[in-house]
Image (cartoon, grey):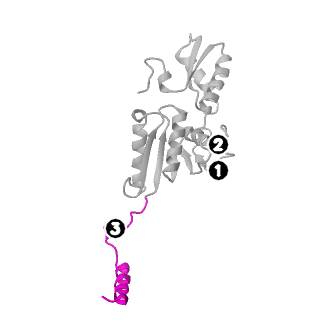
Amino acid sequence: MKRREFITLLGGAVAWPLPASALPTPKLPTIGFLSPTTASVENHRVAAFVHRLRELGWIEGRTAGIKLRWAEGRTERAAEFVVEFDRQKVDFIVSRTTVSVLAAKQAASVVMPIVFAEGDPVGTGFVVCLASPGGNVTGLPFPQTNLAVKQRELLRDVVPTLRRLAILANAGKPVTLRDMREVEAAVGTFGLTVVTVEIRRIANLPPGLNVE
């Protein structure tokens, strides 16, 4: 075969269409779902989340990908997962609480969108205001105005003889700590003695109170 004929043949081969199996698979939009607790606690929420996505046309494995991670009550573990999501190039993170925002603050290089389902974004300083949050964080605020007073009133109705109250709080969540201080202030006006216990991980819960 002459050199010119070989080059012509090679050029024609490059132009031939590739079989479908040889074409690169397009990357699906990927959601990083970060749970602050465990799979056993969050299963029903994950199921509802996936179900709603399907209703909107986002089907796992076909039109979208979902990566599930469980922080198990540890903020440092959540931070590790946020870095992992960043390395895997997920498109955005979804979390039930603001734990993912705390984790993202520890991983300062992370700029992907973060969506949370409950919390106080303004009170915790994650957003400037609800109308114009700015940055890469957004979500649904969970209003708790005067909740501490209402909780005390409910306790008074249920246990009229109550004199001593213990409060368990997740010390890794600023919103929870703020709420705990509000409860302390509220019940103090009723003459109650308050004992606060700060919990940083599920293993710190007293026996019989473990949520798993």
Q: Is residue 123 left or right of residue 95?
A: right
Q: Nearer the viewer, residue 55 or 135?
A: 135
Q: Can you identify the residue that label 2 sits on? A: 126
Q: Secondary structure at mark 1?
A: loop
Q: Can you identify the residue that label 1 sits on? A: 135
Which residue corresponds to the image point at 62% horizontal and 38% vertical from the top-left? 120
Q: Which tag is nearer the camera, tag 1 or tag 3?
A: 3
Residue 106, horizontal then vertical, whole percent: 61, 40
Mark 1 and mark 2: Cα distance apart in space: 9 Å
Which comes sooner in the sequence, label 1 or label 3? 3
Vertical arrangement, residue 35 with respect to residue 113, above or below? above
Residue 195, horizontal then vertical, whole percent: 60, 15
Q: Residues within 10 Å of mark 3 (few under 14, many from 20)?
A: few
Is 22 within the magenta? yes
Residue 29 is at least partly visible in this image: yes
Q: Is residue 63 left or right of residue 127?
A: left
Q: How many marks?
A: 3
Residue 186, horizontal then vertical, whole percent: 66, 22
Is 94 within the magenta? no
Q: Secondary structure at mark 3?
A: helix
Which residue corresponds to the image point at 46% horizontal and 57% vertical from the top-left? 29
Q: Is residue 15 left or right of residue 150?
A: left
Determine the image quadrant of residue 42.
Answer: top left
Q: Can you identify the residue that label 3 sits on? A: 22
